[in-house]
Amino acid sequence: MRPRQVLGQLLAVGILLLLGCVRAADKLETPTPGALTVRAIEFPGSEGEMPGHLYEPGGSVPLPGVLVLHTSAGPGPNLEAFAKRLAAEGYVTLTPDFFALHDFGPDGRTDHPLILKDLDGALEYVASHPRVDRTRLGAVGFSFGGRVAVILAATRPERIRAAVSYYAVTSHPHLGGVLSGRAARAEPLPARVQAIRAPLLIHHGEADVNVPVEQARLLHRAMLAAGKSSSLYTYPGADHLFNFSIGPDVRFDPAAAELSWDRTLRFLDRYLKTGR
């Protein structure tokens, strides 16, 4: 065989090997569909190590990190199912348990400094995860957790790039009735919106008997008046916890649940994946 032919064959083999390496690297950097790791974790909180669950998709590419924040009933199967579903879409999600080490009673936990410090610990934990791009962090919360998500956006504006609030209390005085404990002294969310930099997505059922839909409208108006980015969607006939389908007090509205999920996913994809 002539030297020129040998050289040509060696060059061809080298190119094939190089392409194989590139394809292998591409395969390594692509999240594995269906592969999802779920771990019970602990993170530093205000009074010790706080528990939670971490959901991580397969693969090795950096991903956005999202806190998924529970209702006043604490974490449960509905919350974990939401966090798992969101992780399957390419997010590292964390569901902290803010009530694990504290016993405030229902009137004592609203905006409590210990819970807010726990919230900072959860945010730092997910931000420090090796799979998480710490410049792409968000929060999604339900009822109690929805209010906490907005507070986090206001107290950590340099960290939170997108926040989603489901059927949260915006202003306790506007609820009417007799208020007690920390709820009576809680600062209405409109007083906090000036500090928020992240866009906010709000979901609320129009038939919510626990937290009237006007609470969502109040927050939305305050955000717009402050020149902030806010999107509000209300759902006719939907009650409080309309997207929770498991448990003894189910008020599940499947159409509203799926529509709000689609809107939440598009919102998070827009602000945490594309950076717009």
Image (tube, grey):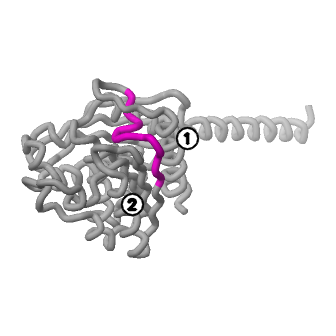
- Residue at which label 2 appears: 217
Residue type at numbered disc 1:
Glu
Say whether residue 113 is visible: no
* Residue 226 higher or lower than 152, as above or below: below
* Residue 138 higher or lower than 27, as above or below: below
Please state the horizontal and vertical placement of residue 191, each as a whole percent of the image.
26, 70
For the C terminus, the quadrant is bottom right
Say whether residue 7 is visible: yes
Magenta segment, which residues?
A: 233-245
Please state the horizontal and vertical placement of residue 212, each as a whole percent of the image.
32, 51
- Left or right for 111, reference 38: left
* Residue 2 higher or lower than 204, as above or below: above
User: Under tag 1, what secondary structure?
Assistant: helix
User: Under tag 2, what secondary structure?
Assistant: helix
For the N terminus, the quadrant is top right
- Residue at which label 1 appears: 29
Residue at image coords 44%, 56%:
201
